[in-house]
Amino acid sequence: MPELMQWRWGGRARALAVALLVVSGAAHAQFANRSIGFSGGYIQLNDNILNRAIPLGLMGTYYLEDGLELTARVHGLIVTLVLDGTQAFAANGGFGIRYLFLQEQFRPYVGIEMSYFQAFLRNDNLIYVGASPAAGFDLMFGSQWSFGPRAQVNVYWMLNRSINAAWELTGEFAAYF
């Protein structure tokens, strides 16, 4: 009789465990792997044609693994011309990768991206391409929102001009999904 009782409880425990597995939901990670957001800030260009710019645009990330994320940015800008102080429209953006040192509420990072900058002037267009190292951090609010500053140095070059370095400070607000 005790063996029969032990088999019954053992069978009930197995049936209960299987029922709990069937009813339970999927496991969830702490943070989602993708983000999209808005960014805005200031760019100081060291050029004899353009002086400064105010970028406003979109940014996004895709988490790979081991703290690595792919990044993408697209901005529309208002640039100020050095010669006469007038303003013109420009566009910039880039694709890159960044490394997160921490992956909790405070997320400092360093990264590098290939950047593109084009100013649409009355008589001409200026097009720059270059590498841009960056550093910053994100503060997570819950598991789906973040805000953080980003500092970046853009090293632009053209075939017929000297290398142009620009520094950029932006604030980024992102939603994770």
Image: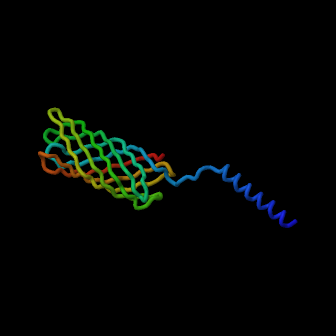
Q: Residue at x 19, y 45 (%)?
A: 51
Q: Position of residue 140 (x, y in %)?
A: 46, 53
Which is nearer the eye, 53 or 114?
114
From what the image shows, is residue 5 above or below residue 57? below
Residue drawn where x is 16% and y is 51% of the image? 163
Find the residue positioned furthest to the bottom: 2
Q: Is residue 109 left or right of residue 48?
A: right
The residue furthest left is 160
**Quarter holding residue 122:** top left
Quadrant of the rendering where the N terminus is positioned: bottom right
Q: Residue at x 14, y 46 (%)?
A: 159
Q: Position of residue 6 (x, y in %)?
A: 81, 64
Q: List the single residue furthest toward the right.
A: 1
Q: How is the image coloured?
A: rainbow
Q: Is residue 150 above or below residue 82?
A: below
- Residue 129 or residue 152, whichever sits in front: 129
Counting labels gives: 0
**Looking at the picture, how far across and down is residue 143, in whole percent?**
51, 51
Q: Nearer the viewer, residue 13 or 81?
A: 13
Image coordinates for residue 34, horizontal then vertical, percent: 44, 48
Nearest to the observer: residue 177 or residue 44: 177
